[in-house]
Image: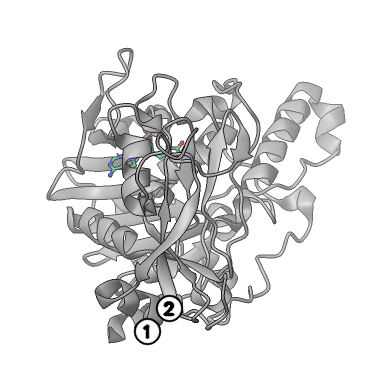
Amino acid sequence: MTHETRGPARGWREATEEALYGPYGFYRRPEGPAGHFRTSVHASPLYAAAVARLLCRVDAALGHPGELAFVDVGAGRAELTTGVLDRLPADVAARTRAYAVERAARPEDLDPRVTWCAEPPAGVTGLLFANEWLDNVPLDVVEVAADGAPRRVLVHDDGTEELGSPVTGPDADWLARWWPLAAEPGLRAEIGRPRDAAWAAAVATLRHGLAVAVDYAHARGARPPYGTLTGFREGRETAPVPDGSRDITAHVALDACALPGGRLLTQRAALGALGVRGGRPPLSLASTDPAAYVRALARAGEAAELTARGGLGDFGWLLQPVGTGVADLLADAGLAELLADGNPQEPLADADPQEQPLTDTGPQEQPLAYEGPREPRAGRAELLVDVADHEEQ
Ligand SMILES: C[S@@+](CC[C@H](N)C(=O)[O-])C[C@H]1O[C@@H](n2cnc3c(N)ncnc32)[C@H](O)[C@@H]1O
């Protein structure tokens, strides 16, 4: 690509917006996200089963409303939406209205029970769930220049970068508050303001219920010094070139997104509280029911992947209650909350693996629909519960 054809230099937020969601954007492609990487949704049907269980808890906390919404934001091809519907008890399924919120077009063969929409429906009651949505909300990147001041990073279509003007106004305020940079040339940060706003807008659509954002995340005590902006294509991590050929993503400052009353957990703790744990089945089962043992072993392997340290288990879950009665639906995960300095507290103990419950059987025995690349976009999450600070703003 020559200097003339590499396009104008612009901020990463604008360049990513076009590269992901423009007319030829990555997320407009027919193969969908699962053609390039896999999320917890694709890793195991245990994940949809756990979210279905959470929806049942929300339903009970809300007193079993006549219409219960399940809103899947950034739904991809609605794999989680349909997976949750398939795992609900009949009486809950009969009252559930499922919405897949997506910028891409509705898949032709999608389950007719799913309402496809570009924005979350307003005024609903139930569970809003956003798995790996916020990391795809485009943001700007800054880098500390030779003079020690943070400047906006500008990017050409071929991925080459240059530094623009110094950061001022609300973006500078956000950096000072959430991602302060020392005057050391080369340090980078990603301005999470558009994600804070996107999350607040999504939460505001709930009249009563629980909103959950799940993503690879970092917290103020442990921001990555050079940022996390990267690309993914066909199962591999690549350079973040904004040309529409690949995903462009950055870890999420979930602590900055949190609204008053929000709570942050690791995925390991959240799924543990919903019954997904990676312990092996008792060996005695192998002799009494070998087939059941093999099935249980397979489920245990999938649960282990969803809760793994250094992998999907380190993802952050931001729980945002709206209205009363829904704040403690994962109260049993309390022990695994993380400290404000970014150091994890002692996690839930994997005491005797043989005693760990496995989640229900039936639907989880279905084969995985996903057979594409097997490279998760996993990253370490060092999280904190920091809502009080946020309220001070
Ligand atoms: C990484 S994929 C995750 C898909 C799915 N949730 C999963 O976990 O497998 C992110 C999805 O969010 C969608 N998305 C991004 N911004 C969106 C927005 N503002 N409204 C609706 N969908 C959006 C993208 O089109 C993409 O399909």
- Residue 56 visible? The answer is no
Q: How many marks?
A: 2
Which residue is labeled 2 in the image? 386
Q: Amino acid at mark 1?
A: Asp
Q: Is residue 288 left or right of residue 295?
A: right
Mark 2 vs 1: CB contact within 8 A? yes
- In the picture, the quarter occupied by the C terminus is bottom left
Q: Secondary structure at mark 2?
A: loop
Q: Amino acid at mark 2?
A: Asp
Instruction: Reply above or below: 361 against 155.
Output: above
Which residue is labeled 1 in the image? 389
Dividing the picture into quadrants, the one containing residue 295 is top right
Q: Which mark is residue 194?
A: none
- Residue 41 visible? The answer is yes
Dividing the picture into quadrants, the one containing residue 343 is bottom right
Ligand 1 quarter of the rendering:
top left
Foreground pick, 17 / 335: 17
Which residue is rendered at x = 66% and y = 37% of the image? 302
Pick out the residue farthest to the left.
Answer: 123
Instruction: Reply above or below: 68 against 391.
Output: above
